Structures are given as structure tokens and as C-alpha cells.
Image (tube, rainbow, N blue to C red):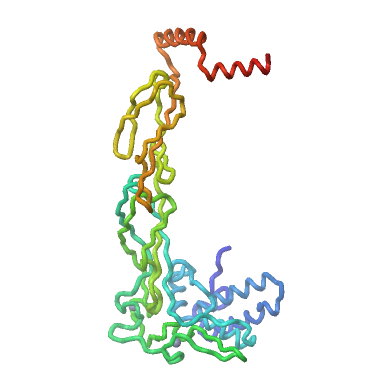
Amino acid sequence: MPKRDYYEVLGISRDASPEEIKKAYRQLALEYHPDRNPGDKGAEDRFKEANEAYSVLSDGDKRLQYDRFGHAGPAGQGFGDFTGFGVEDIINDFFGGIFGGGGGGRPRRGADLRYNLTVAFEDAVFGAEKEIVVPRVGRCGDCSGTGARKGSRPERCGACNGRGHVTLQQGFFSVRRTCGRCGGSGQVVKDPCGACSGTGQVRESRSLKVKIPPGVDSGIRLKLRGEGEAAPAGGPPGDLYVVLTVQEHPFFARNGADLLCEVPITFPQAALGASIEVPTLSGKKTLAIPPGTASGHDFVMRGEGVAALNTGRRGNLVIRVLIEVPKKLTRRQRELLAEYQELSEASPGPISRSFFETVKEIFG
Ligand SMILES: [Zn+2]
Ligand SMILES: [Zn+2]
């Protein structure tokens, strides 16, 4: 289901004041609270939707980001968790502390990113270095990610004394929550940076070199530590995961470290034996076909496969020979084959002999 606009959810205009936002949310929270609507899935969804809308629009930074980027949010992948202090705070005011406390005051980490990269068969087998351009939310260069205007510094948050969390007494329990004023960073920005509106984050396209180790296969995830999105308020950045898709090769099929290649041969080559040229990763090589080779026979060339990603040990190359039956014959070829057939009828091979003997035994 497509997400509804947060302003629409709360039924307010886009220039609503913080007081109006709070008031609209209170009304909805009271109306749709699960305690008042037991078993009503629709009410529960409305309640969650209102919580989410409120947690974003009640936070100055998040609201700015939402106005600029919509639901995609600052990280390009939504606004993350919706259990901010503000929501709990209000719900607890109204409903008597039925919600548990949030986390412990660590600054939030930036979002992880995924990048899908298609690589050529050879690059996956031999390794390569590729350059990719990743659109992401990065650290603002003007304020070094602090969100404070150049020359000023974020100040210690008075609400939590810079600890990033507050401890609340609730009856017999004391509950530790992420500080709502500073979002867990322990710092507040009095004079916001103009380049990033005080968020410490900017949109950017970052160009990165990705080292592809030899032996990778489709589905492998390469982790680039710290190359994900920048975190708000000076937290650690997320990681970037490069997910690989390996292109198919015209004649090598891959099965882990092993390779399979189907090579056509003629009936006389199979019957008489032959020395044929086969492709390998290191160029053409000669393979001896012994006389009397069956169609579909596999010849294993040890160590001619792909170097395994973990051990570096090379797999095998399997050459499967397939007899190609000619569709068109010259007159001379037809004459020779007819003569060959006459001679063969007198002395059938062991497979034919045993098959027809069995058929005769059963059907008479
Ligand atoms: Zn900035
Ligand atoms: Zn604080």
C-alpha cells in the first residue's frame, strides 16, 4: 500500500505549527489507541500511521528532510524507527506509561546501502577493480557533519547533560530513554549550518573503487565498511554492500569452482578416437578422445576450473563431448554410411545386442 502523506495523515496543512501538529496527533492517538479499539486492525493501522507521521513532523530536522525528499527520507530508505521519545512522551502523558522505554543513548548509526553490480564472467574469475558511483547521504563538508555553522560548535545538551539519555522513574522501575532534545548525541546545535540546514548531512554522488577478488560468483556481497550513509549528529556511518551478478559466458557454465563446457565431436571422432582442441580459461588445449567414446561423456581436466574464493584452490574443467549428427549429407557420405550400416548389422555393439535380446525374451 502506498504511504499517505504525513500532513494528510494528521489532517493538517504543510505550514502547521508544532503546536498544531501536537494537537492533531493527540486527537488521533486518543481516537485510535489500541486499548480503546481492541481487535480492530484498521484502528491499529491508523494509530501506527499517526505515530509515524508525528515522529517525523514533530522533529525539526526530520520534518525538513521530509519536506525536501518525501517518504524516501534523508537516507533514501525511509525514516527508520518510529519509537522516538516524543511519541512515547505524549502517549505516556495520556495513557499512563504503558509503553516501554527506548534505547540507551548511543548516537544513531548511518543507514546501510546496497548497490547491485553486474560483472563480466572473466572479472569474476580473475578478479578486477571496478569504479562505481553511489548516490547517498554523506557528511556535510561545511560543518564536518556536526550541523553547527562554521566557526560555532554544537553545545552540550542541557536536557541530558550531554549523556544522550535520560532516566525516568516510573513507579518501581527506572527507565532509560534516548534523550528527545538531542536524539542521543548529547549535543544540540544552536546556530545551524546553512549548507545542510543543521542536519550535518548532504546528498552526494560518491565514486568508489570496488576490488573484486578472484573467484566471486553471483549473489556474493562485498562489504565496504563505513561507505554507507552518514549518520545524523556525528554517529558512525553505515556500510555499503555491493551485491554481485556475474554475466554468463558463451560456452563456460559455472558450478562453484568447476566449469562445464560442451564440445561437439563427429561420430567418426568418437568411434576412431581423436585429438581435439578445447577451450580453457588459459586458452586452447588439446584433449585426447579415446576410441569408442560415448556421446555425453565427461572428460575432467583437473585444476583448469576457477580459483575458489576462500581457499584459492582451482576447481576442474569438465569437457562434455556431444556427437553431432549431420543433417545434410553429400552423395558420397551417404554411400559410405550405407555401406557402414550394412557391415554394422552383421556385428551389433554390446549395448544394442543386450537390449534387443532382452526385448526378445520379454515379448518373444
Ligand atoms: Zn553542514
Ligand atoms: Zn540530550
> Which residue is farthest left?
151
The quarter of the image that holds ligand 2 is bottom left
Counting from the top left corner in percent of width and height, residue 304 is at: 34, 40
From this view, report whether residue 63 is shown above or below residue 267. Answer: below
Counting from the top left corner in percent of width and height, residue 264 is at: 40, 27
Q: Is 216 on the left or on the right of 96, as rendered?
A: left
From this view, report whether residue 302 is shown above or below residue 40. Answer: above
The residue sitting at 37% across, 74% down in the picture is 201
The residue sitting at 44% across, 67% down in the picture is 76
Nearer the observer, 327 or 5? 327
Q: How many marks?
A: 0
Counting from the top left corner in percent of width and height, residue 185 is at: 42, 82
Position of the C terminus, as image quadrant, is top right
Position of the N terminus, as image quadrant, is bottom right
The residue sitting at 45% across, 19% down in the picture is 327
Counting from the top left corner in percent of width and height, residue 141 is at: 30, 75
Q: Is 131 on the left or on the right of 102, as rendered?
A: left
From this view, report whether residue 97 is shown above or below residue 298. Answer: below
Nearer the observer, 96 or 1? 96
The residue sitting at 43% across, 16% down in the picture is 328
Nearer the observer, 71 or 108? 108
